[in-house]
Amino acid sequence: MTDHESPVRGEDAPTAGLDPGTDPSQEIVPLLVTDRAHRLRELVPAGVTLAFGVTILVLAQDINSGVRVELGPPFWPTMLAWCLVVLGILMAAVNVLRGVSSTNLPDPLTGWGMGRMAGTVVILVAYLLLWNVLQFWLITFAATVALTFLYGGRGWKPLLLFPAIVAVVLHFLFVVALRVNL
Amino acid sequence: MIQIAASPVTDGIMTVLQPDTLLYIGLGIAVGMLVGAFPGVTATMAVALASGFTLTLDPIQGLAVLLTIYVAAQFGDRVPAILINTPGTPASISTTFDGYPLALKGQAGLALTTSAFGSAFGMFVGIIILAVAAVPLSELARQFGPPEMFALVVFGLTMMVGVSSGRIIKGLAAGAFGLLLSTVGRDPITGDARFTLNILELNGGIPFIPVIIGFFGIAEVLNQILTRNRLEHHIKPVAQLGQWMPGRQLMRRLLKPMGIGAATGSVVGLVPAVGGDIAGVIAWENARKVSKHPEEFGKGSMEGLTAGDTSSTATLGGSVTTTMALGVPGDSVMAVMIGSMMIWGIQPGPALFSTHPDLVSSLVTIMVIATVLTLGLSLLRMRGMVRLLELPSHYLWVIILIFCMVGTYSINNSVFDVFMMMVFGAVGLFMLRFGFPAGPAVLGLILGPLAESNLRRALITDGWASIFTSPIAMVLLAIAVAALVVPPVRQHAKRRRIAGTAAEEARVS
């Protein structure tokens, strides 16, 4: 994947390896987690899958085609939407009733992390809105300072030197070298 | 004076040997090594981000950057796996089995260099497969009509879903979601508008580079931010590297595991969507079975380390081969690369090597140069690499987020693209948190038009019979079904066996 499902742990976000001395070959079968909280949580992805399928089924009725044929433009989306409906029901039946594979369980959220994510979204939206209002290097410098501060960077190196390097590199790369209209 | 006759092979080589292309290869190596060395930044994320910058380049230069990042990341990711027991990318999972125990024994230096030699050997075997098999495979695939092409897309998609052990249903749902995303815009046969919601920008379909950057960049970083603890400290890297270069005797002992790794990786690599992480683990297990010292495996075995690393890199050649010759991505990095190639006007698939006969030699040359240079770089005793692992993650998060924003905007100078990237970052985060693999969704988005147009053409010609009467289509579909059914059945059987053994032990005690 080389970047896809790991048989040992999750996908795309490599985590710490095995404890030295353990037998790696014993870790390959994912465990089945059967506690109530985790099983009920699976109603969310199943519900979203089902709802998305139904929405597409409704929207597919409104596709206006000049060509009146059986295998017209709504055929393929309708077929896929039915697949999603079936998979949503199957997801609920298998994961909620039987249990969840350990590979489906995410790392736990932290309160500090949620606060930082909310701050990140605000800073990124403000960065996007101010792009064409302020100079690109200036707004990039300000956004980098704000994000670094939010993630715990303190001192002149993380809050002045690092943002200055990022702003200069981005300005040179995008505005000077690639001539992007920023 | 020696006259070199112009041929597609020499043309392809000469294109890569241009100074500016070599410069881009150097850039790709630097980025790839860094990407591999930082846990949490995957090759897919880096290639997705880089695809935003490379769209303005000449296709060969762009491919040189993307492919080199991928090659170099396969070397760089071994460093954190050995020094801090954390794989830089999933491909180096098997490296942690023996790499970290070796580092704890004071043999980190030897582990790093033997791993680099094994990786380079695997890469060269993969490159040979690309050079030999790509054109014959594409010639075979040129016989494919609409039913076979549809079956091929289903095959590729289900292979990617099939390796998502423990989440087949969610993988299928993600694949269907990706296929549905590809229906937004104009119908590929009649040209009618579908799901455009009266938004002008959606007439051309959902732009896939912003979606890919959202899925693999924004979503990954936001997930790391959400789950990282304020007081979390870095694992201290093993700083004592010890002996550096391996002796002849050790290298001779490692030839056998290298051979096992290369053979395993070559076979696994040719299967679409099955990547280096799985190949590494399989080869590690194969090498243990035939080793004279199986008891050392998992406790610091040079053989185990070399077999896994050789195998995981040997998949790369096969992965590029199936991507280019069949148009079905070998893994998620290749799915991203297909997206970039389509923007350059290069459509990977059976007709690729007849329309671009020089491409195979260009790809081979890029990979050979990248492998040789990265091997050289990996053999330098760099203490800076150890210090790099101590860098706090907030620097990385900031760089990735800002690059995602600006990189996406730079593709079309479009704020709409950035908005789409943020929306799909949120969708990707939801998928990550609830266990939907992103790979099948991206694959569905890219291969959707191919699947739809070929299915509809096949059905218009002769109904469902056109698919059921095609032996090639039926074989591909049968393998696809097996890929979905066999892994859960095997897992179920293994779980029952483990539960049975545990019950037996409880009864005895």
Image (cartoon, helix red, strand yellow):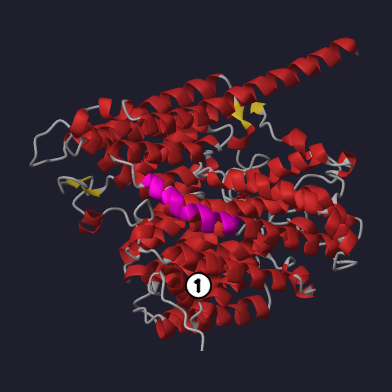
Q: Where is residue B2 in the image (x, y as percent from the top left)?
A: 51, 85
Residue B216 seen anywhere in this rendered image of the structure: yes
Residue B316, x across and y down, in percent = 58, 55
Instruction: Categorize mark 1 by other alpha carbons within 10 Å: few (<14), some (14-19), many (20+).
Output: many
User: What residue is drawn where x is 84% and y is 42%?
Assistant: B291
Using the image as rendered, state which of residue A46 and residue B73 is in the foreground.
B73
Rendered view: B137 above or below A96: below
* A123 relative position to B41: left or right: left
| Residue extending farthest top | B507
Compared to residue B132, the image places residue B449 above or below, namely above
**In this figure, which residue is indicated by the disc labeled 1?**
A143
Q: Quarter holding the C terminus of chain B?
A: top right
Q: Do we see residue A15 in this rendering?
A: no
Task: Decide whether the magenta segment is chiefly helix, strand or loop.
Answer: helix
Amino acid type, label 1: Ala
Q: Position of residue B471 (x, y in %)?
A: 37, 29
Residue at horizontal 24 percent and vertical 59 percent from the top: B201
Q: In this view, does B393 lie above or below B261?
A: below
- In the image, B150: left or right of A116? left
Q: Residue at x 81, y 45 (%)?
A: A19
Q: Which quadrant holds residue A26?
A: top right
Which quadrant of the structure image shows residue A76? top left
The part of the chain drawn in magenta is B126-141
In the image, residue B364 lies in the stretch drawn in magenta:
no
Q: Nearer the viewer, residue A180 or B489?
A: B489
**Label 1 marks which chain's residue?**
A
What is the tally of numbered marks visible in this picture?
Answer: 1
SS for callout 1: helix
Q: Residue at horizontal 38%, vertical 25%?
A: A86
